[in-house]
Image (tube, rainbow, N blue to C red):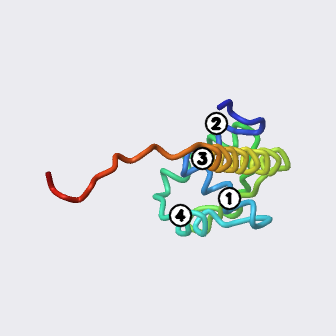
Amino acid sequence: MSIPAGFDELIHPATRLSVVALLAATEWADFAFVRDSLSLSDSALSKQLHTLEEAGYLELHKEGGGRKRRTRVRLTERGRTAFDGHVAALRAIVEGAGSTAATETPPRQPHHSGTGR
């Protein structure tokens, strides 16, 4: 089976896919909300956000300074397009596997007489 068009290796790992899926449901999200929603450490989330930002999939906006600093994040149009394409590719994989499984005949089971001999 070939990988369908739209499958995105960058956002496929579970943590990045979770981040992108969460952000796809909103316009902007606070860093703390994303971190807490996905049960990630600050450093783990920062690493994933940096990777996605470098790919042009999201935008970070920092407000304030010091202890009052607030970081907000959102998907870019490119990120939304990549997410939509990836979800469509995953659906194609799942649907393809389902149709393949339905057309295959199950393996034959050996017949046992039940006599114990």
Circle on res. 79: none
Residue 75 falls left or right of residue 104: right
Residue 11 drawn at (x, y percent):
65, 44
**Residue visible at 77% across and 39% down in the picture:** 6
Mark 2 vs mark 1, CA separation in Å: 15 Å
Mark 4 and mark 1 lie on one chain; the one further toward the N terminus is: 1
Please state which of residues 5 and 62 is positioned toward the viewer in this rendering.
5
* Amino acid type at image mark 3: Ala
Residue 90 falls left or right of residue 66: right
Return the residue found at the far left.
Answer: 117
Circle on res. 38: 4
**Residue visible at 66% across and 60% down in the picture:** 71
Residue 64 drawn at (x, y percent):
68, 64
Per the image, the residue denoted by label 2 is: 9
- Frontmost of labels 2 and 4 is 2
For label 4, count other residues whose C-alpha is less than 10 Å away and answer few (under 14), some (14-19) or many (20+): some
Q: Are marks 1 and 3 in contact (CB under 8 Å)?
A: no
Return the residue found at the far right.
Answer: 77
Mark 2 and mark 4 lie on one chain; the one further toward the N terminus is: 2
Instruction: Determine whether the residue tagged by mark 2 lies in a helix, strand or loop.
Output: loop
Return the residue found at the far top.
Answer: 2
Per the image, the residue denoted by label 3 is: 101
Circle on res. 21: 1
Please state which of residues 88 and 48 is positioned toward the viewer in this rendering.
88
Instruction: Determine whether the residue tagged by mark 1 lies in a helix, strand or loop.
Output: helix
In the image, residue 84 sits, relative to residue 1, either above or below, namely below
**Residue visible at 64% across and 61% down in the picture:** 65
- Give the quarter of the image for residue 33: bottom right
- Frontmost of labels 4 and 1 is 1
Instruction: Determine whether the residue tagged by mark 4 lies in a helix, strand or loop.
Output: helix
- Frontmost of labels 3 and 4 is 3
